[in-house]
Image (cartoon, helix red, strand yellow):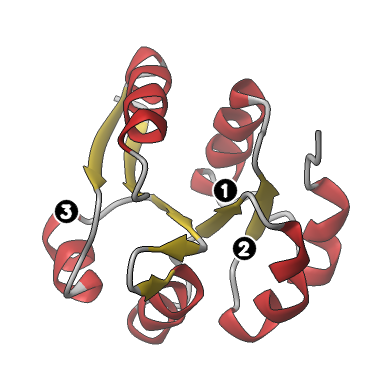
Amino acid sequence: MEGKVLIIDDEESILDVLTECFAEENFEVKTLLAVNDVVAVVKDFMPDVVIVDFLLRGLNGGDLCHEIKMVDPDLPVVIISAFPKHTLSLGRYNCDLFIAKPFDIFDLVEQVKLLKNNCKLGSYENSLHKQKIK
């Protein structure tokens, strides 16, 4: 097994595609359309990387990232969003990487592998250079 990835997105089609891609790469995948207690889910599943959509129904993915980082600052969190203008506020959430939708699925998988292997891409500011806006 390559590792574990937790994916939180309110679009079931995105979850289905990401699950298939990460499963093909031998990741154990847990997906959630919504979450009330992200910390409990992280403690229970113990993912190597978390992917979270920035805009969720009734939630802010950035806030979820912040909650995760308060408990485990070394757990890599990738924020994805169809609204790249939100990148201005991402620094305060301490995410490890931002990727704009639509994104190259193979690039996302490779970035997750890098993060999982503790090859951090650098600070949030440096990660902005890695974002894929298509």
Q: How far apart are marks 2 and 3 (CA)?
A: 20 Å
User: On the picture, is 127 further left or further right than 49?
Assistant: right
- What residue sits right under mark 3 in the picture? 45
Asked whether, in this view, residue 128 is left or right of residue 60, the answer is right
Please tell me which of labels 2 and 3 falls first in the chain: 3
Q: Residue at x 81, y 33 (%)?
A: 134
Residue that sits furthest to the front in the current view = 57
Whether residue 14 appears in this view of the structure is yes
Q: Camera-side residue: 9 or 76?
A: 9
Disc 3 residue type? Answer: Phe
- Mark pair 1, 3: CA separation: 18 Å
Residues under numbered marks 1 and 2 in contact, where contact means CB atoms less than 8 Å apart: yes
Residue on which disc 2 sits = 96
Q: Where is residue 37 in the image (x, y as percent from the top left)?
A: 17, 75
Quadrant of image for the N terminus: top left
- Identity, as a three-letter code, of the amino acid under mark 1: Leu
Residue at far top of view: 24
Crowd rating for badge 1 (residues with CA inside 10 Å; few <14, some 14–19, many 20+): many
Work out whether 54 lies above or below 47.
below
Q: Residue 69: horizontal and vertical position, in percent? A: 44, 78
| Mark before the other along the chain sequence, 1 or 2 | 2
Q: Distance between the residues labelled 1 and 2?
A: 8 Å
**Is there a contact, CB below 8 Å, between mark 1 and mark 3?**
no
Q: What residue type is labelled 2?
A: Asp
Residue located beneath label 1 in the image: 115
Question: Marks 1 and 2: which is nearer the front?
Answer: 2
Pointer 3 local density, CA inside 10 Å: few below 14, some 14–19, many at least 20: some
Q: Is mark 1 on a helix, strand or loop?
A: helix
Earlier in the chain: of badge 1 and badge 3, it is 3
Residue 52 is left or right of residue 111, and the answer is left
